[in-house]
């Protein structure tokens, strides 16, 4: 009988240890549901700045062929953009006292379509668009070395 009591005691202790150990490693679980959110960015405007040519880039002369326009185009967006369209304004002289703005004109065949790829967050530097500006055949000597500005609006699409 004594062995039986001993066996019962060992079984009780083993059960208690097993039950206690089970409680020690038990974990609660929880779950839930709801919604997440995302948002689309807002497209930033491309930034166009004039680059005044010098040396070989300064190609305008009285009665000569239509000359190029140079510009930097900055893409502040987090995605690449391809510039596809150009809209030209009225060109002006930067030195109207020596070369009146009437001496410079937009060429009738100035391009309005291009394909200029600009990676995300970068600037396309010294972009050249040919065939834009005409210097009058009667332009005076005062137009030599003068720079001319022309407003331009660029349009493009995300690549």
Image: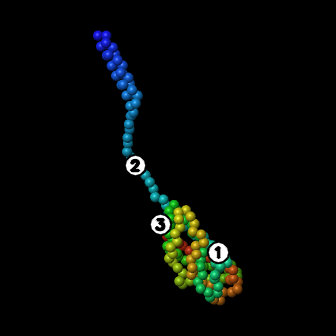
Residue 159's spot in the image, x, y percent? 47, 66
Residue contact between numbered discs 2 and 1, judged by CB atoms under 8 Å: no
* Residue of label 1: 52
- Disc on the earlier residue, 3 or 2: 2
* Residue of label 3: 159
Residues at marks 3 and 2, CA–CA distance in whole angstroms: 31 Å
Between 142 and 69, the one lying in front of the other is 69
Which secondary structure, mark 3?
Answer: loop
- Disc on the earlier residue, 2 or 1: 2
Residue drawn at x 36%, y 19% is: 13
Relative horizontal placement of residue 62, taking residue 39 as reference (left or right) = right
Report crowding for label 1: few under 14, some 14 to 19, many 20 or more residues within 10 A (C-alpha).
some
* Residue of label 2: 35
In the rendered view, tell whether residue 119 sits above or below residue 115: above
Residue 96's spot in the image, x, y percent? 68, 80
Residue drawn at x 39%, y 46% is: 34
């Amino acid at each position: 009988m004594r062995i039986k009591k001993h066996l019962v005691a060992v079984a009780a202790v083993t059960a208690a240890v097993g039950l206690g150990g089970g409680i020690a490693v038990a974990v609660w679980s929880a779950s839930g549901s709801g919604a997440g959110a995302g948002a689309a960015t807002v497209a930033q405007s491309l930034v166009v700045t004039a680059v005044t040519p010098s040396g070989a880039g300064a190609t305008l002369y009285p009665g000569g062929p239509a000359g190029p326009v140079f510009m930097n185009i900055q893409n502040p967006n987090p995605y690449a953009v391809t510039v596809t369209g150009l809209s030209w304004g009225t060109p002006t002289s930067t030195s109207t006292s020596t070369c009146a703005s009437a001496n410079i004109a937009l060429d009738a065949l100035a391009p309005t379509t291009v394909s200029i790829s600009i990676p995300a967050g970068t600037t396309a530097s010294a972009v050249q668009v040919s065939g834009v500006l005409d210097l009058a055949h009667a332009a005076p000597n005062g137009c030599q070395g003068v720079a001319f500005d022309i407003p331009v609006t660029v349009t493009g699409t995300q690549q």
